[in-house]
Amino acid sequence: MCHSCRTQRHRHGLTLLPFDSDSEGSCRSSTILECSGGDTDVNAKFFDQIEKLLPSARVPEGFNSWMDLDREDDEEPDSSRNKRNGLGEPLLYVTVEQLVRLASHEGVTSTPHNKATWAYLAQISPKTKVALYWN
């Protein structure tokens, strides 16, 4: 995919899903951290920086999150939908350690919401996996 296409894609949004559990057969995230808007150009550059953290890895088999919730029945997350992001691409993860390196980026510092998200990330284990749900 060309650089400008990736930038266009990322302008829509990103949700971070820190893993609560990462044991075999029980991979789950019950935390949803939205990266909020702000200046579109700043977001595009910020999302490009996050993408540069790649290559990342695909989420483990059986990963569940509340992003998989069927909005009609408000039941448990549907593990059959948890392998793809909002763009239909494989759901990938990075670590908190990788993300906190971006704490001084304008995409974080320009919005109070993103500052709070990165403050949260700074308080959890640096080895924690974080799924990147692009939409």
Image (cartoon, grey):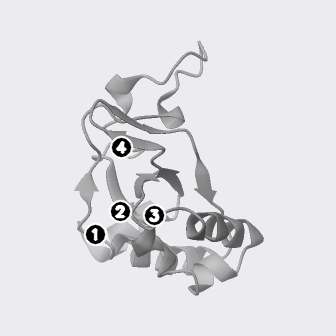
**Number of residues whose C-alpha sits closer than 10 Å to that of mark 2, classed few (under 14), some (14–19) or many (20 or more):** many
Label 3 Cα crowd, 10 Å radius (few <14 / some 14-19 / many 20+): many
- Mark closest to the chain's N terminus, 1 or 4: 4
Tell me the residue that label 4 is attached to: 22
Q: Which residue is mark 1?
A: 54
- Between marks 3 and 2, how big is the CA–CA gap? 16 Å
Query: At 33% from the left edge and 42% from the top edge, which residue is drawn?
Result: 88
Is residue 85 placed above or below 98 in the rendered structure?
above
Q: Amino acid at mark 3?
A: His
Q: Amino acid at mark 2?
A: Val
Q: Amino acid at mark 1?
A: Leu
Instruction: From the viewer's perspective, tell me whether residue 34 is left or right of residue 85.
Output: right
Sequence-earlier tag: 2 or 4: 4
Q: Please name which of the two marks, 2 or 1, marks the residue nearer to the observer.
A: 2
Give x and y (percent) for residue 41. Answer: 56, 80
Question: In this rendering, which labeled residue sits more in front, label 1 or label 4?
Answer: 4
Whether tag 2 and tag 1 are in contact, CB under 8 A, the answer is yes
Does 30 appear above or below 124? above
Q: Which quadrant of the rendered structure holds the N terminus?
A: bottom left
Q: Is residue 101 above or below residue 29?
A: below
Q: Which residue bears the numbered disc 2? A: 94
Q: Which mark is residue 10?
A: 3
Question: In this rendering, is residue 118 above or below 124?
Answer: below
Q: Report helix, strand or loop for mark 1.
A: loop
Task: Compare marks 2 and 1 and give the one earlier in the sequence.
Answer: 1
Check whether the beta carbons of the residues at disc 1 and disc 4 lie within 8 A of each other: no
Of badges 2 and 4, nearer the viewer stands 4
Q: Nearer the viewer, residue 110 or 93?
A: 93
